[in-house]
Amino acid sequence: MRIAFIGLGHMGGPMARNLVQAGHHLRVFDLSAEAAQGLVGLDAQRVQAATSPAEAARDAEFVVTMLPAAKHVEAVLCGQGGDGSGVLATVPRGVPIVDCSTIDPATVQRLAQLAAAQGNPLADAPVSGGTGGAAAGTLTFMVGATPDLFAQVQPVLQGMGQHIVHCGTTGTGQVAKICNNLLLAISMIGVAEAMSLGAALGIDPQVLAGIVNTSSGRCWSADTYNPYPGVMPNAPASRGYSGGFGVDLMRKDLGLANDAARQVHQPLPLGAQALQLYELWSRQGHGQLDFSSIIQLLQGQRPA
Ligand code: NAD
């Protein structure tokens, strides 16, 4: 299949690579020419670099976007002020567009209406699994789409992921994603508090993590991604909080959850507090560190 793939960052780069390895032909675009050339270097027969999203989509049979936030997705689909550089200016009628970025459900629904007016179905398919899952092709996709569109996009998504879940109508993939990340942010702060208290009171953090992970405090933030340095050799905490899922991306997702909650009058007392803690940590200059570095805010330390 000829796929236009736009946004080749920490997640999009490895996802696009897996589509090439699955046998697809890609036309790629990223603001970073270096990121696009990295993909072309993989297989120049099957990957071409485009000069705009519109050029990438011109003869595509499928479009995937993987961008930081809603404003980027909007710019890539619609162009800048109707300058014809966006996907919707050229994409052939009927070609499905799948946005894998994490953005707000309302923007997805608005963009889906714009795409539908041009005869293109749009699905939201945000992912979980992190950069490791993107590289290994084991991501979970949370898909918001009609049943027909889901059936159409599922085989392509299987080239990048292990679990492709149909969440419901357009926008519900994003609902699932922001609820999951709300819980993840809160659980990470909880684990960071417990590990910091235990260490301050003198227990070996490794022993404490072992107890928690076989007791009722167990959760992913404790047993897979523990924020205390040295407890888990493969977690970002054991490599100076580099790589992984950035503080600023978590801040963005908590903002999406809090905004969506306001729209439906749903109180999120812990979600609001989590957002404030990540705002503060980002403001102190740590926006690019992995989100588990929030433990350093509680401990009053800077990462080494
Ligand atoms: P990233 O910042 O590494 O990559 C984004 C890419 O988009 C960059 O290469 C950038 O140059 C490109 N870009 C930005 N604006 C563009 C435009 N107008 N046209 C073309 N390219 C443009 O981000 P990422 O970590 O790959 O995350 C992408 C999305 O996936 C985000 O919404 C994030 O919340 C979500 N996500 C990330 C992770 C993770 O672990 N990093 C996990 C799950 C979901």
Image (spheres, rainbow, N blue to C red):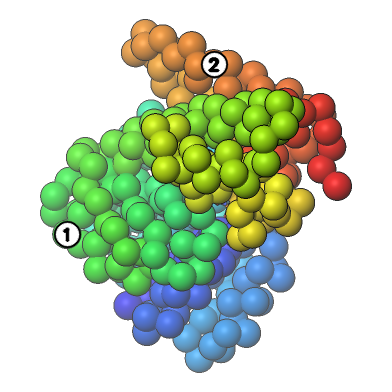
> Is the shortest distance between ligand 1 and the CB of mark 2 under 8 Å?
no
Please say if the residues under marks 1 and 2 sit with CB atoms less than 8 Å apart: no
Q: Nearer the viewer, residue 148 or 204?
A: 204
Amino acid type, callout 2:
Ala
Above/below status of 96 relative to 19: above
Amino acid type, callout 1:
Ala
Q: Nearer the viewer, residue 208 or 260?
A: 208
| Residue under the image location 30 percent in, 67 percent down | 158
Bin the neighbour count of mark 1 within 10 Å (Cα to Cα): few under 14, some 14-19, many 20 and up. Answer: few
Q: Position of residue 57 (x, y in %)?
A: 44, 65
Query: What is the quadrant of the N terminus in the image?
Result: bottom left
Residue beneath disc 2? 272
Q: Position of residue 264 (x, y in %)?
A: 34, 13
Residue 29 found in image quarter: bottom right
Secondary structure state at the residue bearing disc 2: helix
| Residue under the image location 50 percent in, 40 percent down | 211
Q: Position of residue 184 (x, y in %)?
A: 48, 35
Q: Is residue 143 left or right of residue 210?
A: left
Q: Is residue 173 left or right of residue 69?
A: left
Q: Nearer the viewer, residue 62 or 42?
A: 42
Bin the neighbour count of mark 2 within 10 Å (Cα to Cα): few under 14, some 14-19, many 20 and up. Answer: some
* Tag in front: 1 or 2: 2
Q: Nearer the viewer, residue 75 or 13?
A: 13
| Name of the residue lying farthest toward the bottom | 45
Residue beneath disc 1? 151
Q: Is residue 205 left or right of residue 69?
A: right
Tell me which label, 1 or 2, sits earlier in the chain: 1
